[in-house]
Amino acid sequence: MQNSRFIPFRKQDIVDICSEELNSSTQQTSFKQFCDLLVSLIHYDYHTVLEALKNNYAPFNPNSDTRILTLVSAEQKAQCQREFAKDFAKVLNAANFEVITNEDLQDALNEESLFKVRLEVEFDDFEEVVFYRRGESQLTETITSFWGLRKKPLHFTNYDRVAVFIRFKDSAYFEAKNKTPLGFEPSSTIVKLFQNVPKADLEMLFPNSEVRMRPIDKAIIGSSALIGGAVVLITKLGASILLLLALFAFWGGFRSEAVEMTQQHFITFAIGMGVFGSFIFKEWSKFKNRKIKFMKALSDNLYFKNLDNNAGVFHTLIDAAEEEDIKEALLAYTFLLKSEIGLTAQTLDEQIEHWFKSKYQCDLDFEISDALEKLERMRLVTCTNDVYSAINLEHAKTILDERWDNLFQYN
């Protein structure tokens, strides 16, 4: 399995463990001051990204509670959607999320679900669908069947975080299909964030997924209805049905002997039909109740997996992207600071990955290119003949301090 780019440690933990890698207490104090400046600058940069996301999402935010001063045309709204989708994808990439491919989504529809519910998704309702994941692990869960008598282990791929971006088709499409959208508006865009989602159950994250009875459930209910119905017909209506058949045969000329239907026979037949009707209603109710049970299970499951919706999602993801940027920059700078002769990008990448594996038993694919790009942009490293070197801490603090001051200078 490909290692994740996500660094599974808190930002403050990375600051602490990087500080421990330095030699003297004086250097550690200076390093933490450097970290505070770096964190503040990166946070400021992401504040600008957040404002752009909020402004572009505002025209189609389904949860907005503010008034609209200027009407937005359909063309402007479409442009905002395109800009939002582009910036949202950049934030997810910065937060070290990976795109879930169409092949993975198809696998999810075909694999055995842990959820024991069959879901159907109308993919034609969507103009655009993109799923993202972060954190992947192989887990095992025991699945029971036959009323708990049979148990078997099921191995599955689990995603720690899943972000969903969906844009629906316009109202003309739903009018042409004579279909009423439930829970969403045509042309709207929704974003959602979930946790601990098995790959085989990705389809439950679609907003228009509908519960369908599995073949095994239909077989259980159908066989029960067939056997029960036969018993009711034989025990309650057997004699009356035979008498009616004989009567029809007499009227049709297939029987010479007359058949007499008394009042008692009609009463017995009516009672039998009432019993049979109540049995049919009971079986139909059982089918409906089983479907309601599945829908409740789906709702309960999503309740605990859902982390955020719509505007709340990109607030959460901005924070995640900001933390990943800070962690990557701090790790790269720390290891370059420790090296007296400098390191190539590949060597630095290998050292950081080996350090995580040997010291914290953590396999990851460190984003060395992103880390070095940030450090070069902030002028915290120099590069000569593909060998990178970190500038000293005091000089680095001065550069960051000057950059921070320049942000608040007004002409």
Image (cartoon, rainbow, N blue to C red):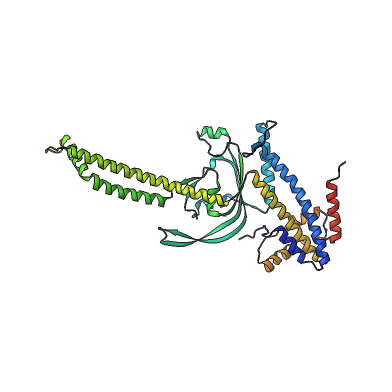
Q: Position of residue 44 (x, y in %)?
A: 77, 48
Q: Quadrant of residue 253?
A: top left
Q: Is residue 238 left or right of residue 221?
A: left
Image quarter (top left, top right, bottom left or bottom right) of the C terminus: top right
Q: Which residue is at 32% across, 48% downward?
A: 226
Q: Quadrant of residue 69?
A: top right
Q: Which residue is at 80% across, 68% downward?
A: 23
Image quarter (top left, top right, bottom left or bottom right) of the N terminus: bottom right
Q: Position of residue 369 (x, y in %)?
A: 74, 56
Near-viewer residue (398 or 271): 271
Near-viewer residue (236 or 22): 236
Q: Which residue is at 54% across, 49% downward?
A: 302
Near-viewer residue (392 or 387): 392
Examine the rendering and report whether any part of residue 404 can be seen. yes
Q: Quadrant of residue 62?
A: top right
Rendered view: 190 above or below 401: above
Figure disc tally: 0
Residue at the limit of the structure toward the left, as seen here:
257
Q: Position of residue 9 (x, y in %)?
A: 68, 60
Q: Which residue is at 41% across, 52% downward?
A: 216
Near-viewer residue (199 or 402): 402
Residue at the limit of the structure toward the right, as seen here:
411
Examine the rendering and report whether any part of residue 94 can be seen. no
Q: Is residue 170 left or right of residue 260?
A: right
